[in-house]
Image: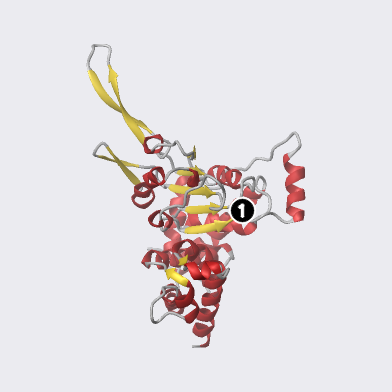
Amino acid sequence: MAGPDDLVAQIESLGEKLGQARTSIANRFIGQDRVVDLTLAALVSGGHALLIGLPGLGKTRLVDTLSTVMGLRGNRIQFTPDLMPADILGSEVLETAADGTRSFRFIEGPVFCQLLMADEINRASPRTQSALLQAMQEKEVTIAGQHRKLGVPFHVLATQNPIEQEGTYPLPEAQLDRFLVQIDVPYPTRATERDILLATTGTMDAQASEIFTAGELLGAQTLLRRMPVGENIVEMILDLVRACRPDSDAPQIVRENVSWGPGPRAAQALMLTVRAEALMQGRLSPSPEDVRRMAGPVLTHRMALSFAARARGQSLPALIDTVAAQITRVEAAA
């Protein structure tokens, strides 16, 4: 077991390597630093990420770039209304050998990889969306009664159009809960859009370089779990997650606006991602500010506003930020 000095050196080294990964990604995915940081945080934490934004904002390009930078074997699925579960998982086919004997052979679907890009996941029917549930949670699938392991590591980076877009289906709550973070991809700033325009309309397309290998990413995920977390941060995470559940002990703003709140998986996700956020910022342990910054990405897709709150124009990110600010102020003063 490495001593404290060795652990500090390993954490600092991982932070530097992540900095190199961010630089490599920036060669192809210009701007949107927060989006890049959250996606890297999801991978280093060992989880899946859901990227939400309008078409044409670079979500597909980001995931493709990450496959190269993180050294992962990637596959892509374009979700459409007629996509079937077997198109994702694979199927058995009956083959006839040269001697006339017949046997079943399993043909792997695109889910058998290390980084799966589920493009426009909410364009497929709920039945097809649910084909990913077991894969995302257990890193294996069951087909024809056999358990088949997926790649190691295995991550799903799904893109989703806003639910108001025509021809989309909302993701089931159980599947949303499997995503470690929800990442909103906004329009770029004018300066960023100008850089994109110049970089992507010439004769040369910038290339990203491999920074991690699959083995190094697995090592980073193990190291992240060894990063120390102060007792006050643990209590802050618990207080925040529990405060977002609309029961009698919840803040008034939650009781009046939230119909259902996050479960224990949200606390686990927050515990991992605040470590990743601290790592991205070059620190050795998470701070209250890390909890506040990661609250929205971790909790937004694990909660739902009541009908009355939606009618009033209330938004979940604003509500979560308000509750997180209250919790972090109270804990800091204690």
The number of callouts visible is: 1
* Colouring scheme, one of rainbow, by chain, secondary structure, one colour: secondary structure
- Residue at point 48% right, 67% down? 307
From the top left corner, tell me how far across and down residue 214 is, in percent: 46, 46
Looking at the image, can residue 293 be seen? no
- Residue at point 64% right, 52% down? 23
Q: Quadrant of the N terminus?
A: bottom left
Nearer-the-camera pick, 78 or 46: 78
Residue corresponding to mark 1:
22
Nearer-the-camera pick, 9 or 192: 192
Nearer-the-camera pick, 96 or 279: 96
From the top left corner, tell me how far across and down residue 314 is, in percent: 56, 70
Task: Report whether 186 appears left or right of 330.
Answer: right
Task: Report whether 325 appears left or right of 82.
Answer: right
Above-or-below relation of 49 to 121: below
Kindly identify the amino acid type of the residue bearing the numbered disc 1: Arg
Above-or-below relation of 306 to 46: below
Nearer-the-camera pick, 123 or 153: 123
